[in-house]
Amino acid sequence: MTFVSNYKNLEVYILSRSLASNIFLLTKKFPKEEMFSLTDQIRRSSRSVGAQIAESWAKRRYEKHFISKLTDADAEILETQHWIEIAFDLQLISEEELAKVLNDCASINRMLNSMINKSSQFCK
C-alpha cells in the first residue's frame, strides 16, 4: 500500500480546500447583515477542516493525537454542513448548491473516518 509523503497530496486535504473555496464564493452573495454571523461561521468551519488535517499530519508520531485532530476536522465538516443547511433554509443558496456542498461534506467525512480507522498505517 502506497501512502502520500505530504498532507498536501491527501485527497481529503485537496477536497477540503476546494470546499472552503466553494463556500467562500457561495457566501460572497449572502446579505451584509449576515457578514458577522452566518457568513463568518460557515467560512471559519469550512476553512478549519484543512487546517485540522494539516495539524493531524504533524501529529502522526502520536496516534492518539493524529486521531484527535482528524476527529476535530470531522466535527468541523459537520458544523459546515449545519451552516450550509441553515443558508438553504434562509433561501440564500439553491438546492443544487446545497447538494454540491453536502456531497463534498459526505465525501470528506468518509475519507476522514477511513483515515481514523486506518490510523496505525499513517502513524508508522
Image: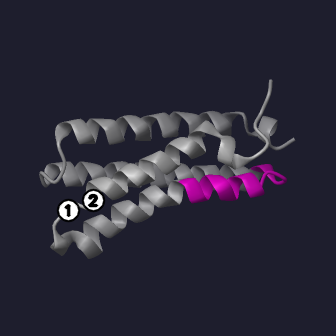
Q: Label 1, on which residue? A: 30
Residue 76: % across, % down: 47, 55
x 74%, y 39%: residue: 119
- Whether 51 is among the magenta residues is yes
Q: Amino acid at mark 2?
A: Thr
Display coloring: one colour
For this rendering, which residue is in front, 37 or 29? 29
Residue 107: % across, % down: 47, 34
Report the side of 70 relative to 82 (left or right): right
Say if mark 2 contacts mark 1, CB within 8 Å.
yes
- Whether 34 is among the magenta residues is no
Q: Which residues are magenta?
A: 50-63
For this rendering, which residue is in front, 52 or 15? 15
Residue 26: % across, % down: 28, 53
Q: Which mark is residue 27?
A: 2
Mark 1 is surrounded, within 10 Å at the Cα level, by few (under 14), some (14 to 19) or many (20 or more) other residues, namely some
